[in-house]
Image: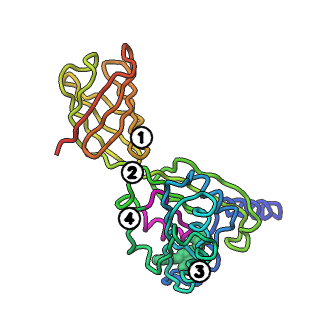
């Protein structure tokens, strides 16, 4: 019995250790934004590296605290950016730090509710927020951010959105924040919006007639069919990374690998398969 209790305790500790809990201080306030809890500076660097931030980027940190993510993006990675923070005193502190660190011409911090802020300018969006806030933001991110924008979330994933990458590490600094050493950083890439119906021009080896494509997009995953020669061919392993679309078409007993770039209502790309090497294909969305 005693052994069982010890085993159970070990199991529970292991299970809890695997998932960072909400920052402790946050739990005290549920309606308010919650107190400010900074990302450790090493995590800030890792977040910006995972997003491959560079001088062409505009980084927006939602809930920017003392401004460290946007300040580091400007000072170390040469980016421009904006922090959005609901606590006025932290905004003043961040703008003063920007002046002192000589980056006030490239970054600004605004006192606003992140849910009511226009984020469309971001090429990289970062956040370290409560898990439910992160998920409440998902629709806004998909609606407002341009395809290809990188989204980085510290500790909490966006449910239903498969990350491009994530890294996990153990950090002693995190014990005081979340009670465990486990630290996770998730990278997402905003996908293009794929219209449901298209007419495609394929290499003549595949079809001499225009082909109707039907796509069903679930954030970054795509399924569907292509109507070829009076039959529906299955679109498999469809995937969007920003504007980049890839899928496999299984037609007449053969596999064809499609890639293409989605620009609003057009797709242009190439297809590989039996007898086809980088052959051009294109499609136009049906309204
Ligand atoms: C965990 S801290 C992270 C600070 C900083 N991003 C970092 O990683 O060091 C979260 C911050 O988000 C702010 N915040 C929470 N909800 C907000 C909202 N609705 N609008 C603006 N700021 C918010 C909090 O005031 C807090 O400073």
**Mark-to-mark CA distance, 3 and 2:** 33 Å
Residue 252 sits in which quadrant? top left
> Rounded to the nearest whole Å, what is the CA distance between mark 1 and mark 3?
43 Å
159 and 68: which is toward the camera: 68
Q: Is residue 74 visible?
A: yes
The residue labelled by disc 2 is 147
User: Does the CB distance between marks 4 and 1 fall below 8 Å?
Assistant: no
Residue under label 3, please give it.
96
Residue 29, quarter of the rendered image: bottom right
Up the image or down, 169 lies above or below 221; here it is below
Specify whether residue 123 is painted magenta.
yes
Residue at mark 4: 140
Badge 2 residue CB within 8 Å of ligand 1: no
Q: Is residue 10 above or below residue 211?
A: below
Q: CA distance from mark 4 to mark 1?
A: 21 Å
Crowding around mark 2 (Cα neighbors within 10 Å: few <14, some 14 to 19, many 20+) is many
* For marks 3 and 2 on the same chain, the one whose residue lies earlier in the sequence: 3
* Badge nearest the viewer, 2 or 4: 2
For mark 1, what is the residue? 239
Secondary structure state at the residue bearing disc 1: strand
Query: In the image, which residues are magenta?
Result: 122-140
The answer to whether mark 3 and mark 4 are in CB contact below 8 A is no
Q: Residue at x 36, y 61 (%)?
A: 144
Q: Nearer the viewer, mark 1 or mark 3?
A: 3
**Badge 1 or badge 3: first in the primary sequence:** 3
Q: Which of labels 3 and 4 is toward the front?
A: 3
Q: Residue at x 28, y 16 (%)?
A: 205
């Amino acid at each position: 019995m005693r052994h069982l209790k010890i085993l159970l305790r070990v199991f529970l500790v292991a299970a809890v250790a695997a998932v960072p809990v909400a920052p402790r201080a946050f739990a005290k306030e549920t309606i308010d934004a919650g107190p400010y809890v900074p990302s450790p500076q090493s995590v800030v660097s890792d977040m910006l590296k995972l997003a491959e931030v560079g001088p062409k980027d505009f980084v927006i940190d939602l809930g920017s605290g003392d401004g460290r993510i946007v300040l580091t993006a400007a000072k170390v990675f040469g980016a421009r950016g904006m922090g959005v923070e609901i606590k006025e005193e932290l905004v003043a502190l961040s703008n003063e730090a920007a002046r002192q660190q000589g980056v006030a011409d490239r970054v600004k911090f605004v006192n606003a509710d992140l849910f009511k802020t226009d984020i469309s300018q971001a090429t990289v969006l970062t956040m370290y927020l409560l898990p439910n806030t992160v998920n409440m933001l998902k629709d806004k991110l998909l609606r407002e951010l341009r395809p290809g924008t990188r989204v980085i979330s510290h500790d909490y994933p966006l449910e239903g959105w498969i990350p491009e990458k994530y890294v996990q590490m153990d950090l002693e600094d995190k014990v005081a924040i979340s009670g465990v050493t486990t630290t996770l950083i998730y990278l997402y890439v905003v996908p293009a919006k794929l219209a449901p119906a298209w007419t495609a021009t394929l290499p003549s080896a595949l079809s001499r007639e225009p082909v109707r494509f039907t796509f069903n997009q679930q954030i970054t995953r795509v399924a569907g069919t292509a109507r070829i020669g009076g039959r529906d061919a299955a679109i498999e392993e469809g995937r969007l990374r920003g504007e980049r679309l890839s899928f496999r078409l299984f037609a007449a007993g053969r596999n064809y690998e499609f890639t293409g770039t989605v620009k609003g209502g057009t797709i242009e790309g190439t297809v590989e398969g039996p007898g086809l090497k980088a052959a051009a294909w294109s499609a136009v969305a049906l309204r």
